[in-house]
Amino acid sequence: MSLWRDFKNGLFNENPTFRLVLGMCPTLAVSTTVVNGIGMGLAATAVLVGSNVIISLLRNVIPKDVRIPAFVVIIAAFVTIVDKIMAAYVPELHKVLGIFIPLIVVNCIILARAEAFASKRPVINSMMDGLGMGLGFTMSITFISAIRELLGTGTIFVAKDFGFTGLKVFAEELGAIIMILPPGAFITLGLVLAGINWLVSRKGAKTA
């Protein structure tokens, strides 16, 4: 029961994007297509799970005075692994995500879970927490990406690495180009957050 709670916490109650509002830089920057969102989310998930496990294993070994530098080194090691794997197997996606893959090292979500959870909890719990937080981030950024890609281009699920041209829903001329530009990211995120907060407050009012 505890493991399930740790896992679903990142999906819903403490979703890093929609509830904690962390990791906004990659969320706003790369959420122009669904494939970008999935790629960024899964890369962060791999780093979260791996770093949480190692930090939990070493939680009684790492001195408290140097814990943050130690966490960063561990996270950086996993980011390097993920970066090289993506460069080898999904080069087009790796090129599009660019600097945001190395910047996973300083992603607030990963550092926050290392400090608040993995450094204080057992390995299995830390792994489930990392998986839940990572998939919660993946779902959130993919949802935002789907809205922006569809409304901006009229097409969804374009995946160049896999030779998929996407599903055309309507003509590109009918799309709102602003949705795949930086302002579109802020507009989409703001509206989605407003909708979620409204639903949460409405649910709270019903249970009160």
Image: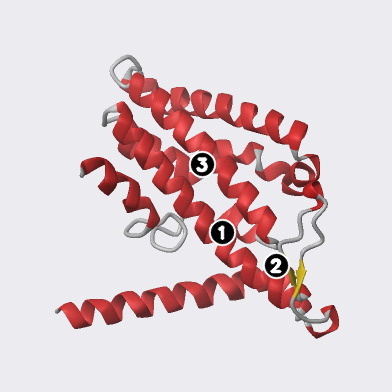
Mark 1 vs mark 2: in front: 1
Applied colour scheme? secondary structure
The residue at the point 83 percent across, 78 percent down is: 172
- Residue 14 percent location from the top left of the image: 35, 56
| In the image, farthest residue toward the right | 173
Q: Which of the marked residues, 3 or 1, is nearer the chain's N terminus?
A: 3
What residue sits right under mark 1 in the picture? 141
Whether residue 163 is situated above or below residue 125 in the rendered picture: below
* Within-10-Å neighbours for mark 2: few <14, some 14–19, many 20+: some
Q: CA separation, marks 3 and 1?
A: 12 Å
Q: Residue 182 carries which label?
A: 2
Q: CA separation, marks 1 and 2?
A: 15 Å
Q: Foreground residue, 56 or 139?
A: 139
What residue sits right under mark 3 in the picture? 45
- Residue 25 percent location from the top left of the image: 59, 54
The amino acid beneath tag 2 is Pro
| In the image, farthest residue toward the bottom | 174
Q: Is residue 171 left or right of residue 137?
A: right
The amino acid beneath tag 3 is Thr
Whether residue 66 is situated above or below residue 95 in the rendered picture: above
The image quadrant of residue 157 is bottom right
